[in-house]
Amino acid sequence: MTIATDGIYTFKNFDGKTYNSINQQEIMSKFFEDRNELENNNKLKKTLFEIKNQYGLMPSDDLTMIRIIKRINKMV
């Protein structure tokens, strides 16, 4: 479960250069659904930098998120 401010809807090109495209749903999926690197305390920050570097987008309003992830321990 993720709770986010409306800043999640404000991603815009920050430097006027041309980058690969990504839609709003894909941006939200990267933040809300991606389960890679869950152990990394800076995962959300890293995702923000990825979107900036690969797609040239940054939020134009404050962006705050709380993400709660249920872990399932597998018995071996």
Image: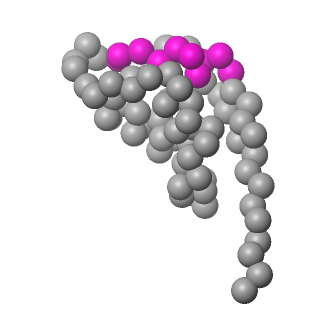
Pick whichever, 30 or 46, lies toward us.
Answer: 30
Quadrant containing the N terminus is top right
Q: Is residue 34 magenta?
A: no
Left or right of 23 on screen, residue 75: right
Residue 56 seen anywhere in this rendered image of the structure: no
Q: Is residue 3 above or below residue 60?
A: below
Q: Is residue 8 above or below residue 41?
A: above
Residue 35 seen anywhere in this rendered image of the structure: yes
Left or right of 36 on screen, residue 6: right
Q: Is residue 7 magenta?
A: yes
Image location (x, y in percent) of residue 59: 49, 20
Q: Which residue is most to the left? A: 18
Image location (x, y in percent) of residue 61: 55, 14
Quarter of the figure with residue 7: top right
Seen at 56% across and 30% down, the residue is 28
Left or right of 14 on screen, residue 46: right
Q: Which residues are magenta?
A: 5-14
Seen at 40% across and 33% down, the residue is 51
The colour scheme applied to this rendered structure is one colour
Seen at 35% across and 16% down, the residue is 13
Q: Is residue 18 above or below residue 43?
A: above
Image location (x, y in percent) of residue 63: 60, 24
Quadrant containing the C terminus is bottom right
Image location (x, y in percent) of residue 9: 56, 16
Seen at 39% across and 26% down, the residue is 22
| Count of residue discs | 0
Pick whichever, 43 or 31, lies toward us.
Answer: 31
